[in-house]
Amino acid sequence: MPDTQYKEVLIVLIACIALFLVLAAIILLFLYLYQRRKFVQKQQVAEMELQFREQSLKAQLEIQEQTFVAISQEIHDNVGQILSLAKVQINVMNESGKMDKGMLEDIRENIGKAMSDLRDLARSLSSDRIQSRSLQETLVQEVDRINKTGIIRAEMTVEGSPREIEPGKKLILFRTIQESIQNCIRHAEATKISILLCFQSDLIQVSVRDNGKGFDTDAVLQRGSGLGLNSIRTRMQLTGGSSVVESTLLLGTNVHLSIPYE
C-alpha cells in the first residue's frame, strides 16, 4: 500500500475513533446529567413530601386546638350557664325549705336541655360520626345545633347533586366550616348565618356568610393578626382546594371554600 493511501486510511481511522470518543463522551455526559436531574428531582419530591407532612401535621394540630377551644367555649356559654341556673334554683329551694313543684320542673327541663346540648356537641366533634355521614347531613346537624342555642339563626342551601368526598378532605372541610361559623358567633356580632353547599362536577364549593359587623381583611393581614385567615388558606391548599375571605365593614363576611372530590 502506498504511503499516501496508508496516511489517508490512518486519518480516516483516527477521525472515526475521535468521533466515536466524542459521541461516547456526549452519551456519558447526557447520562450523567439525566441521572443528576433525576436525583435532584427525587430530592425535591422528598423535600416537598416532608413539607407537606409537616404542614398537614400543623394543620391537624391547629384543628385539634381549635376544636378544644370550641368545646370549652360551648360548655361555658351554654351548658355551664344552664347548669349554673339549675344550681341556683336548687339552692333557693333548699334555703326556703319548701318543695316547689314548679321549680323542680324548671330544674328538670334545664338539666335535660344541658344533656341535650352536650349530646349535640359530642356529635359535632366526633370524627367517626362525621365520616359515617355525608357532608350535607353533618352540616344539617350543625345548623340545627346552632339554632337550638338561640344565639344566632342559621340556614343552609344545597345546590347540585350531592357527591361523596374523600374522607380526609371531608373532615378538614367540615372543621374549617365549623371554625368559620364559630367566628361568626364570637366575633361578627351577627344575627344570621347562611351556608351554601354547591356540588359541581369536579369540586365542592361552600360559602359561609354572616350579616355581622365585618372587618378589613387587608388591615388584619398587615397587622399579622390574621392567623385564622392564614389557617383556612393553608388547610384548603393542603387538600388541593382554595379559599377566599370577603368582608365589608358593617355589611358582614363571606368565606368561600373550594375543594376537589378526590
Image (cartoon, helix red, strand yellow):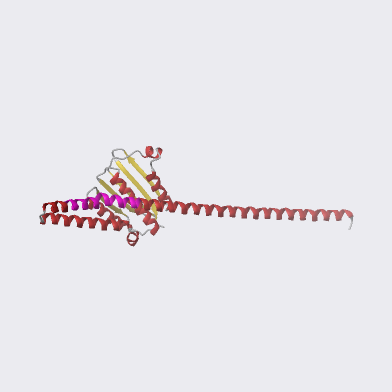
Residue drawn at (36%, 44%) of the image: 245
Stretch in magenta: 66-88
Please provide percent x and percent y for residue 246: 35, 42
Figure quadrant of the N terminus: bottom right
Q: Tell whether 10 sits left or right of 81.
A: right
Please provide percent x and percent y for residue 103: 13, 54
Please provide percent x and percent y for residue 55: 45, 51
Q: Residue furthest bottom?
A: 132
Q: Tell whether 101 sits left or right of 178.
A: left
41 or 146, nearer to the observer = 146
Q: Main secondary structure of the magenta part?
A: helix
Q: Tell whether 108 sits left or right of 177.
A: left
Q: Tell whether 77 sits left or right of 235.
A: left
Q: Is residue 161 visible to us here?
A: no
Residue drawn at (36%, 49%) of the image: 257
Residue drawn at (25%, 46%) of the image: 192
The quarter of the picture where residue 188 lies is: top left
Residue 77 within the magenta-colored segment of the rendering:
yes
Q: Residue furthest right?
A: 2
216 or 89, nearer to the observer = 89
Please provide percent x and percent y for residue 90: 16, 54
Q: Is residue 17 visible to us here?
A: yes
Figure quadrant of the C terminus: bottom left
44 or 196, nearer to the observer = 44
Residue 58 within the magenta-colored segment of the rendering:
no
Q: How many marks?
A: 0
